[in-house]
Amino acid sequence: SMTGASMFWLDALHGCKLDQPLLLPFDRYRLSNEHRTGRGTSIPFDFGQDLSHDFLIHASLNSISLEELALATYYVFLFKLTNGEK
C-alpha cells in the first residue's frame, strides 16, 4: 500500500535532510552545446543468490517492477552517500 511505502521511506530516511537538493560532484563543467557521443560503460557485479532472491521477493510482494525497486534503492544509496551535503 502507498501508506505502508510512505511509512517505510520516512523511517529509512529518518534524520536525513530531505529539504536539500541532491548535488552530486562531476569531473568537469559541461557546456550545454557540447557534443555528446552517447557512449557508456557497463560494469557487471553480483549481489549473491540470497540478496538477489530477497530483492525478487520484495518486488513481487509489493507489486513493483525490479526496475522500480533497483532505481529506488540506487536513489536511497546516493542520498545516504551525500546526505544532501554540497
Image (cartoon, grey):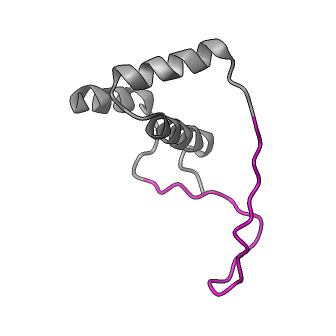
Q: Quadrant of residue 64?
A: top left
Q: Position of residue 36 (x, y in %)?
A: 70, 76
Q: Residue at x 69, y 18 (%)?
A: 48
Work out which residue is located at the far top of the displayed protein and give it: 50
- Quadrant containing the N terminus is top left
Q: Is residue 60 left or right of residue 23?
A: left
Foreground pick, 8 / 85 = 8
Foreground pick, 22 / 51 = 51
Prevailing SS of the magenta stretch: loop
Q: Is residue 68 left or right of residue 48?
A: left
Q: Quadrant of residue 27?
A: bottom right
**On screen, residue 49 above or below 75:** above
Q: Quadrant of residue 35?
A: bottom right
Find out whether residue 5 is within the magenta segment. Answer: no
Work out which residue is located at the far bottom of the displayed protein and give it: 33
Figure disc tally = 0
Q: Residue at x 52, y 36 (%)?
A: 70
**On screen, residue 63 above or below 39:** above
Q: Residue at x 62, y 40 (%)?
A: 81
Find out whether residue 22 is within the magenta segment. Answer: yes
Q: Position of residue 14 (x, y in %)?
A: 41, 31
Q: Position of residue 78 (x, y in %)?
A: 58, 44
Q: Residue at x 38, y 26 (%)?
A: 11
- Quadrant containing the C terminus is bottom right
Q: Is residue 43 left or right of residue 78?
A: right
Which segment did they paint magenta? 20-44
Q: Is residue 8 left or right of residue 83?
A: left
